[in-house]
Image (cartoon, grey):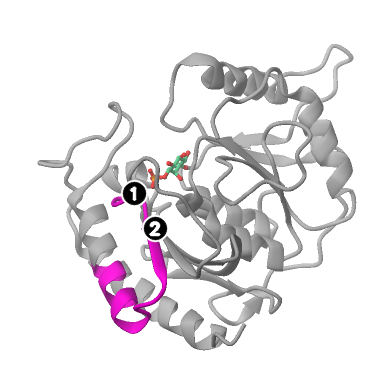
Amino acid sequence: TDLNLHEIHDFMIEIARKAGERIVSATPSTQGVGNKKNSVDLVTETDQAVEKLISTSLHEKYPTFAFMGEETYKPGDKLNEAPTFILDPIDGTTNFVHRHSYVSISLGLSLNLTPTIGIVYNPFTSTLYSAIRGQGAYLNQSEKLPLSPPTPLETLNSCLVAVEWGSDRSGNDFAVKSKTFAKLAATKEDGGGMVHGLRSLGSAALNLCAVASGSLDIYWEAGCWAWDVCAGWCILKEAGGMMVDANPGNWEPRIDERRYMAVRGGEGQREVIKEFWSLVEGKFEVG
Ligand code: IPD
């Protein structure tokens, strides 16, 4: 393409940092905004204000690019091949409301439905993850990811695995999640087999960056959206990680598949993915 990806990347970082100041100085309030779908699907005034701030700046500078954002998405909106900024103004809204600092701005650019630029910024810890497709992934624009050479992924039971409860807490998909969580955590009959640990940290974008960095081995979730994953996906891939479907069998999920499993770089990725898939009982319907 003839787009200047570096210039776009730098601009995205600049506005993510500005938006970060806004988030850090805000008092989280769901008043007058409330929850979207149920009592655990939260949105605050800050989510909406930050989306507006970012989408306005992006539109002024890149008026021909499309935009998709969590707070302005309408059912039926579909991504297409056009250059599209994909934004989650606050990924980890529940954490934000509780003043837990695992929160990020997730801003991606998709081209031909492929994550092409990823910016994930945690304004509370001033941690910035960024990547341009084909050009590597970085922490704070200086340290290359992963942070150290990846050791082989030997077996699933030596992995640190992130999962998320998400906001759907009933029905088939919730059952598939809970059964799999229990299987991952439990000792096998022969006494071995449980994963080193299960984490549920509350920001899909930061989870993907942790897998990219190497501090998580796997992240598995169904129910999140393109804005939760576009930026982190680009960072993950550039760091040598892989993204596959949370449902067994699909090695190449679409960006809007709503089911994802991220695995860090290192030998044995495919084997560990197959091992994980073999534990998934049932099938997610979302997507
Ligand atoms: C949520 C977070 C959470 C994930 C949910 C997302 P939000 O994003 O990423 O970790 O489990 O699926 O919706 O609502 O805080 O922007």
Seen from the viewer's position, the closer of residues 79 and 132 is 79
* Disc 1 to disc 2: CB gap under 8 Å: yes
Give left or right: position of 78 versus 211. Answer: left
Seen from the viewer's position, the closer of residues 50 and 267 is 50
The image quadrant where one finds ligand 1 is top left
Residue that mark 2 sits on:
68
In whole angstroms, how far apart are the C-alphas of marks 1 and 2?
Answer: 6 Å
> If the image is split into quadrants, where does the C terminus sit?
top right
Query: Percent from the top left, x then y, of residue 145?
Result: 68, 70
Quarter occupied by residue 11: bottom left
Q: Is residue 124 magenta?
A: no
Q: Is residue 170 above or below residue 285?
A: above
Residue that mark 1 sits on:
73
Q: Is residue 273 above or below residue 203?
A: above
Which residues fall within the magenta stretch? 53-73
Query: Percent from the top left, x then y, of residue 259?
Result: 60, 38
Q: Is residue 190 above or below residue 206?
A: above
> If the image is split into quadrants, where does the N terminus sit?
bottom right
Question: What residue is drawn where x is 81% and y is 61%?
Answer: 150
Q: Is residue 55 magenta?
A: yes
Seen from the viewer's position, the closer of residues 235 and 117 is 117
Mark 2 vs ligand 1: CB under 8 Å?
Answer: no
Badge 2: residue crowd in 10 Å (few <14, some 14–19, many ≥20): many
Query: Between disc 1 and disc 2, whose residue precedes?
Result: 2
Question: What residue is drawn where x is 32% and y is 68%?
Answer: 20
Q: Is residue 230 above or below residue 171?
A: below
Give left or right: position of 274 versus 31. Answer: right
Q: Secondary structure at mark 1?
A: loop
Question: What residue is drawn where x is 89% and y is 54%?
Answer: 267
